Image (spheres, helix red, strand yellow):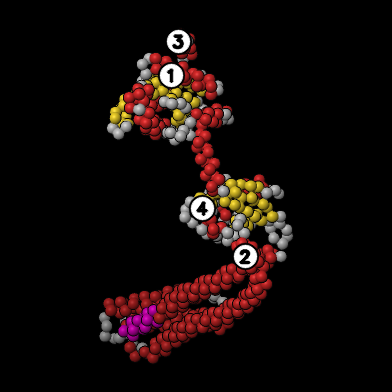
Amino acid sequence: MALYKIKNTRRLILLFAAISVILVGISTASLLYLNHTINRLSDSLYSDVYQNSELILNADRDLHQAALALHTVMNRNITREQRSLLSQEFHDNNAQVKQRLGMASYNINAMNHPKKRMTQSNRLLSQLRNELLSFEDAFENWKNTGQELISRRMESNWNPDTYSATMINTRLSEVRSSLDQSENLIDNYGQQITQEFRERKSTLFAAYSLILFLLMLVIIYLCRRVVSLQSEMQEDQSLYQLIGETMSDFIILTDPNGMILYASPSHSSVLGYVPDKGVPLSNYIREAEFSWAKLKSVVQGTPRISELRMRSAEGHWVWLETKISPITGSRAFPAQYMLISREITQRKQHEERLHKLAFYDHLTAIPNRAHFKMYMENLINQPEDRRQEIAVALLDCDRFKQLNDTLGHLAGDEFLQLLSRELQQTVKGFGQAFRIGGDEFAVVLHRFTNPEMLEEMLDRLLQLFNKSWSVNQGSSFHTSASIGVALYPQHGGSINELLHAADLAMYRSKNSGGNEANLYNKLVDEEHSDKHK
């Protein structure tokens, strides 16, 4: 029942998070919409209103220039050449007026209104279009009247008394009146659409505020539900805490994905901290093979005991023997895993010491004969597709007995320790070195790809031995090595066969004066061995 309530609490918290995301999403969407609409309004006012208004103003200015040219051309004191220039100016200005108004009419007729419900701005836009249509008739009358007067003026029998400036001004007033009306309409349209957009924006903010208010009511309701539920759970949680604090074992409860749901306070006594809830257990465990996909496939319906390591607050690893038990799920909550652990660090350290005693030489700290046997069995028993050529080299120190006799056994031990360290470094990356007897070593080489590489490694081993060693606080000792090499599987299919072959090859090197490495040769070494029996 308590786990069910905890699950409900988590669901409510997730619901709060979802509501918060919705609120942020609504706010962001509203702001983006308003920003987009404002940008559209700005572009519309510039391209569809102000630009067209400028065209109308420029047309009015051109019309005024045409009227001045017409009045001037009717003056009786100007020359014929001046009359021709003024006549052309009248024609050009009228053509400019027609072009500008034609462009403005085209733009206004193609104008897309942003909101169909904005009836007032739509009405102004229709009036503007009608006004521009009526302008064309008045403009044609004005232009025809001017051209007719200019034609009469060009005649030789023109009578200045027939010219009436009043008629020209009347025609001009009719045309300019239509332009002024168009200019007023386009200005009113811009103001009206701005006002209507502001009203739309206010409506949008009001709707958003209402939605936000309703969501806040839902959040308040859910908060009250959480508070009520948590108050009911306090007694059970106190009981769980009391149990966790008083027991000595370490308990961790996880969900199916390995996320920690609970960690007992007893972890603090050994680790120096309590694993955090909501964090993957794999963050604390060193074993890479400890994956939850593998765990669920192995554990299934039965408990499993594993040895795991967790890092302490000081940084060292603590060994734990852990029993991992699956908890059967139900419809109320999914399956979970419970880990009950106890510390076994001292036991593991003892096992490690026993392992070193069993598989490592106590004097030189390098692997011993038992380790050599285990190492070779592992290489020989590899699958066929991964099996590789192996070289077993036996190394015997020349004149080692002389060192013990002259400088003592302590100096001999010091020499073996120095030699072991350098021998390990020499074969690092190509194989492993072992001490299998007093001054006898074995080197297993299995990371070479051709005979030339093997020969190079053997030369390096000979050079390692063939030098002066400083032992016993400055005493100098010079030695060399007799090396015998056997190859797997050419010279033997078992460890004993390989050791026997390498021993015969080493015996041949020693009888040849030492300081050389020989590969096992069945005809030569067997015959050589039979002669010395």
Residue at 63 percent of width and 65 percent of height: 242
Which disc, if any, is residue 241?
2
- Report the front residue among 31 and 228: 228
Q: Where is mark 4, residue-wise?
A: 311
Instruction: Say if mark 3 contacts mark 1, CB within 8 Å.
Output: no
Q: Residues within 10 Å of mark 4 (few under 14, many from 20)?
A: some
Q: Nearer the viewer, mark 2 or mark 4?
A: 2
User: Does residue 141 appear in the picture of this structure?
Assistant: no
Q: What amino acid type is highlighted by mark number 3?
A: His
Task: Residue at 54%, 48% (x, y): give it.
Answer: 345
N-terminal of the pair, mark 2 or mark 4, is: 2
Q: Residue furthest right?
A: 331
The amino acid sitting under disc 2 is Gln
Image mark count: 4
* Chain part drawn in magenta: 58-72
Crowd class of label 2 (few under 14; some 14 to 19; many from 20; radius 10 Å): few
Q: Secondary structure at mark 4?
A: strand
